[in-house]
Image: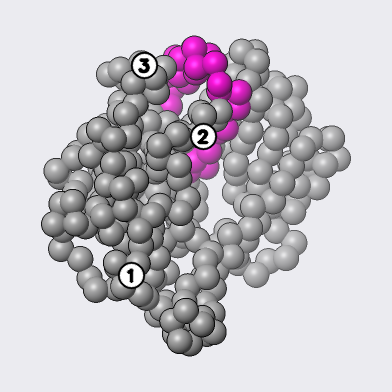
């Protein structure tokens, strides 16, 4: 049941993290206008199960006036609202409160701050902790997101002691390029399901300024500038979707078989295989596997 609409408010980010599965950077393009945001909110209101609107990026605070008005507009429509941020703006606790108080007054329900080595290195007194402290002083609900670096186990009984990847970042986007080297792999045939997204009955979708409605980032349900969001959601048929259907039928390994795709013998995890296969199909399904920049390719949308 769809309950959340997550705005990729912008692909632009002042950071260029190794784990970013959207390839966000200072050079990335694609930012909503306030009229586009309000249009999506009107459509979201038509979907009776949606109760939460989240604003993400990129880094949404880079477009603070847009972010503030977006939170205000969503709150006025009765949605719970959340923001995810890298907290670059929290230079001191007092300064952070200057950023947060207008958002609180606009109706912000929840703040999530990235507090991990990918964003802040080994700095233990970083901007995320200052932002969290400021939010707590204001009486706001706040949570820290900590994405751990890749973890490996040397004792997996099922594979007779062969090391396995235990998790950390999702291995797609820039993470494939930057973080997979040296990690243990296993046969591509082992990845028989999508472990993270419910592609049959999604609980959330991500939307971007190009109109893409992402089931998983880079795998689109359709374009909401061509077909209204509420209509896309109502008419979504996972068994007719060229990517969702094979993934539901047998995971990333079935994607390989369905399209007879070239592949390596082994991959680190399901996301790693799926990302590689989707990259192979970008030109076959350009309106579904989009935008190109989330696959590390030059974006052809302006």
**Can the viewer see residue 197 in this picture?**
yes
Residue where numbered disc 1 is placed: 267
Contact? badges 1 and 3 (CB < 8 Å): no
**Residue 154 in the image, given as x and y percentages of width and height:** 52, 85
- Residue 104 percent location from the top left of the image: 74, 27
Tell me which label, 2 or 1, sits earlier in the chain.
Answer: 2
Looking at the rendering, the stretch of residues picked out in magenta corresponds to: 30-59
- Distance in Å between CA atoms under marks 1 and 3: 37 Å
Is label 3 in a helix, a strand or a loop?
A: helix
Can you tell which quarter of the image residue 172 is in? bottom left
Q: Which residue is mark 3?
A: 231
Q: Is residue 198 above or below residue 205?
A: below
Give the label on residue 203, or none.
2
185 in relation to 30, above or below: below
Say few, some or many: other residues with alpha carbon within 10 Å of mark 2 (under 14 / 14 to 19 / 20 or more).
some
Identify the residue at image location x=72%, y=46%.
143
Q: Do labels 3 and 2 touch, CB within 8 Å?
A: no
| 84 lies above or below 302 | below
Of residues 161 and 284, the one drawn nearer to the viewer in this rendering: 161
What is the C-alpha distance between the residues marked 3 and 2? 16 Å
Q: Relative to the observer, which residue lies in front, 149 or 93?
A: 149
Few, some or many C-alpha atoms within 10 Å of disc 1 (few <14, some 14-19, many ≥20)? many
Q: Which mark is residue 277?
A: none
Which numbered disc, 1 or 3, marks the residue that appears first in the sequence? 3
Q: Residue at x 22, y 70 (%)?
A: 264
Please indicate whether residue 105 sits to the left or right of residue 235 in the image. Answer: right
Q: Is residue 43 above or below residue 155?
A: above
**Tag 2 or tag 3, which sits nearer the N-term?**
2
- In magenta segment, residue 263: no
The local secondary structure at tag 2 comes to loop
Colouring used for the render: one colour
């Amino acid at each position: 049941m769809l309950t959340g609409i997550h705005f990729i408010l912008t692909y632009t980010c002042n950071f260029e993290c190794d784990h970013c599965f959207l390839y966000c950077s200072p050079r990335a393009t694609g930012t909503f206008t306030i009229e586009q945001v309000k249009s999506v909110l009107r459509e979201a209101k038509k979907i009776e199960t949606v109760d939460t609107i989240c604003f993400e990026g990129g880094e949404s605070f880079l477009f603070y006036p847009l972010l503030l008005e977006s939170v205000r507009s969503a709150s006025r429509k009765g949605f719970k609202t959340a923001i995810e941020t890298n907290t670059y703006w929290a230079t001191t606790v007092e300064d952070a409160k200057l950023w947060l108080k207008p958002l609180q007054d606009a109706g912000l329900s929840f703040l999530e701050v990235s507090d991990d080595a990918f964003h802040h290195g080994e700095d233990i007194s970083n901007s995320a902790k200052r932002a969290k402290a400021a939010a707590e002083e204001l009486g706001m609900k706040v949570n820290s997101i900590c994405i751990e670096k890749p973890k490996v186990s040397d004792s997996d009984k099922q594979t007779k002691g062969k090391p396995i990847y235990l998790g950390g970042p999702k291995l797609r986007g820039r993470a494939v390029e930057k973080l997979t080297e040296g990690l243990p792999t296993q046969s591509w045939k082992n990845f028989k399901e999508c472990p993270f997204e419910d592609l049959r009955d999604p609980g959330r979708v991500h939307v971007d300024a190009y109109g893409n409605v992402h089931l998983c980032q880079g795998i689109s349900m359709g374009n909401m500038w061509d077909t209204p969001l509420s209509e896309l959601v109502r008419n979504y048929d996972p068994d007719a979707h060229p990517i969702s259907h094979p993934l539901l039928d047998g995971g990333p390994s079935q994607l390989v078989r369905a399209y007879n795709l070239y592949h390596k013998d082994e991959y680190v995890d399901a996301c790693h295989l799926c990302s590689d296969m989707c990259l192979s199909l970008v030109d076959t399904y350009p309106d579904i596997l989009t935008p190109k920049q989330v696959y590390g390719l030059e974006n052809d949308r302006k």
